[in-house]
Structure formats: C-alpha cells, structure tokens
Amino acid sequence: MYGNEIVALRGPNHKVFAHADDPSKQIMQIHAKPIHYKNIASGIMEDIDLSFQDNGKDMISSKNMVSVGFRKDGNPQKYMGIRAHNDHGQQFELSIYSATINSIILPLAGFRKVSLDTIEQCIINHELSDNVGFHTQVHEAFVQTAIKTEYPVSDFSISFEVHLTGWNCINEYDDGSNSYIENEYGRFVFVSSDGTKLWFERPSMWTDNEHMARGIDHRLEVSGKKFIYSKTANDMGRKWLQTANAPFFIDASIHYADTRDGMSYIANALSWTTIRDQATPSAAFNDIVNNGNSAEAKYAAPFYALYRSWFWFDTSAVTGTVDSVSLFLYGYGLADSDVCAMKSIQDDVLANWTMTAFTGSEYGHVTWALSQYNEIVFNSTGISDINTSGDTKVCIREYTHDYLNSSPTTRYANGCYYSDNTGTDYDPYLEIVISTGVTEDALYMGFVIV
C-alpha cells in the first residue's frame, strides 16, 4: 500500500506517502510527538536524529527541535545549554547549584568523568562519584537530566542555576516569595524573543522497574540576579522512596515540545460496578515510556483494578476525504485479552484527568500481541471523529471485561509503548488514508520524493 514518501508534505509530527495502488490517495502517519525538525539552511523538514557529535570541546545534538550541548571538561558551571535553530543569541543554560541526598551535601567541584553511553548515543553520563551522577537523555520533545544514585534514598533537595540570555519566564510572579507560580500544567515556561518556548515540566522519579510521578515539588525563585530551579521530595515521594529499590533516578526535564499520551488507573476497589464507573483515578501519568498494563481489568481478591490509556494526535493537516483510519500501538509487557479504541474527551491538564473521559461506542478492537504493532481498524464512527481542525483524542480500554462490562475473575492486562519512548520504532501513531482527487502527475509535481 505504501509508495514513496512525499517529503514536501512533512509536518513536525507527520509523514505523507503516496498510495502505491491508487495515485489519487495519500497515506498519513501521524505521531503523538515531533518526528521532524526544520533545517534552517535548506528549509526542509528532516528526520530527527538524536545522536551526539563530539567537537572536542562539547558534545552536541543538533538535528532536533532545538540544539542541545554539553561541555566535556567536567565543569558543573553551565554544563548544559539549549539553543533554538534560528539562533539570535539566545542561550538557556544550567549549572548545578546544590544537591543534598539523605541530609548529606554532595561535593560539586566538578564531574570526574563525562561519557557518551556506548549503547544509546542520545545519553550522556556525568559521574560525580562511584555511586552518584547525572544521567541525561535527549528525546524528540525534551532533555531529561536526572540525578542517579546507586544507593537507597530517603529524602533529597537538588537545585540548578538557570542562565537566561534572550529568554523570559512568562509564569505569574509572586513578589512576597520572590518566586514564580507554576501554571495549570505544573510548568515553568520560558519564551525567547522569536517566540520559541522551553519549559520545566513537573518532575518525576523512578527506579529501573517502578515510576513515581507526583512525589516531587519544584520551585523557580529569584535570588539576587540568579534564577534558581529546585526540586524536593514531598510526603508522597518520601513514602515511595522508603519502599522502592535503587538505583534511583530523580528528574528535571526541560521540554521544547509535548508528548501527548498517558495512562490513568484505579486500584483497591471492592466493587466492580463502582470501579468501572468511577471518575477519579488513583493516579495519572503523562510521562510513561512503556507499561505492561496500559489497558487492564483485574481482580485479585478482594480488590479490583482498572487501567485506561489516552492518546492525542494533531490531525489538523488532514485534507481531502478520509477513507480509512487505524491506530497502531506496539505491544509491551503483557497481552492477556482484547483491547478497544474509542473517542476520548480527556482534559489537556493532567491534574484534571478522569477515568471516564470517553464517549460513544468503540471504534474497533483487536486481540493484543507482544513485540509487534497492534492495529485497531476504525469503523465509520472512528473515521468521522477525525478532527481536521485540531486534535483527535483516543482512549484505549481492555475490551473483554472493561468495555463489555464483564466482571474479571483474574488479571487481564495489555501493555504498550508511549511517545516518551525515545526514537520512533515503537511510537504510537495514526494511519489515515485520504482521497486527494488529484492525478498522479499533479501528485508528484514539484515534490521531493524519497
């Protein structure tokens, strides 16, 4: 079905292909995160390449939405910097200001080793000691710079100095506390003179096999002429730290684009009828890489649990007549039953997420499989719900018990990858076949074909 890609029709989040069997049709692949960046010199949208280049002094990843660089000499002052591609002298840089773990102040005279990960060329490790360092990964939508410890952590406080040239924080400022107030998304947002945005996302922490999204408070304050960004464990975070196992990763992500998906769940409910209709989740996450229970209905006496996932796709570039739509999700972790897709009406703000933000009947369902793409083919309702003037929102649910309202007797879990996973090999995406009504000659006229 797929013909050549029409490069001239690329957008930040989508590719367009000629239809191999019908020249009057095109196929769009729409992702939930950026997959292209604009090459300023050529004006062409190019595939994002997250790998670092070593220029001897710095390591730089530049084939992305922004250019990200790290100094190699181990100096913690301005050890990381971000620039927009249409560079007008703007600089967004970080220095490590202070770090206290388990009431012990870490020495920050310098990193004793700076190295590129030997397996993943988009990861840089800054080693402070044998068991503490900074683990930084560049993603299509953000730079995730996390302090990593190899020993148990009960509490922490970590601060960065933010150096701004040509950037301003647009959050509301509180004169009484000399600090900025996080916005409704939990973010501190900076805007450059040309309109480029960067923001500190609400931080999270995790281990190799467990994730905690709401255990950290963050703050942006002004001390003299310095901008200080800090993150500390709150009560929920300290409780989680008591039960989790090292190594720990404590995050401070800087975003330049959104990843638009996530998962919410309810646990420890005593009634299936109650849990299936309950709106308030036990927790919700919008920064997941992968999860084994993306769509799950579970009973483990005496408790029920329910997991549902949510996906956003910018479908505003869709033109012509939509002939068919499929949702592709790459299976991960568990595959116990069928999964369905339906219309989501989930709020954009994580704090407002509910478990019941869906409407109508299913678009389609599929028996779940691991380590391959699962295709949910949309019916006429799903096709008509494609929003050509904005976002198309999709919810996935465990079909056999959750959607059909059949009380589970054991665990029925189905997992997938989300757009916070680095790279596009396992990305969630929509495939939309469109009738353009143009001839084959007109289709290729003036376009770059690859």
Image: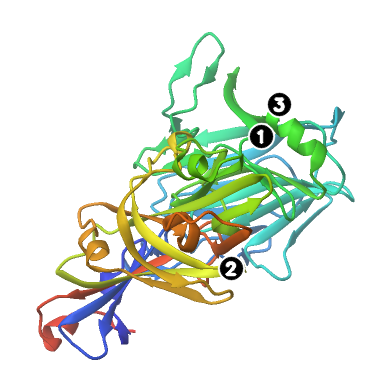
Q: Position of residue 384 (x, y in %)?
A: 20, 61
User: Viewed as shown, does residue 94 lie left or right of 405?
Assistant: right
Q: Earlier in the sequence, mark 2 or mark 1?
A: 1
User: Which is more N-terminal, label 3 or label 1?
Assistant: 1
Residue 75, quarter of the rendered image: top right
Q: Is residue 436 left or right of residue 232?
A: left
Query: Residue 433: where, in percent of width, then height?
Result: 25, 75
Give the CA separation, mark 2 to mark 1. Answer: 31 Å
Residue 30 vs residue 38, the one in the foreground = 30
Q: Amino acid at mark 1?
A: Gly
Determine the residue positioned at 56% across, 61% down: 421
Front residue of 440/398: it is: 398
* Helix, strand or loop status at disc 1: loop
Q: Residue furthest top?
A: 176
Residue visible at 65% across and 67% down in the picture: 121
Q: Is residue 246 above or below residue 100?
A: below
Q: Amino acid at mark 3?
A: Asp
Quadrant the N terminus occupies = bottom left
Residue on which disc 3 sits: 235
Q: CA distance from mark 2 to mark 3?
A: 35 Å
Which residue in the protein does label 2 denote? Answer: 336
x 54%, y 63%: residue? 417
Residue type at the position of mark 2: Asp
Q: Nearer the viewer, residue 59 or 160?
A: 160
Nearer the camera: disc 2 or disc 3: 2
Examine the rendered structure and indicate whether residue 261 appears above or below residue 243. Answer: below
Along the line of sight, the residue nearer the viewer: 78 or 204: 204
For residue 215, which numbered disc appears in the image? 1
Which of marks 3 and 2 precedes in the sequence? 3
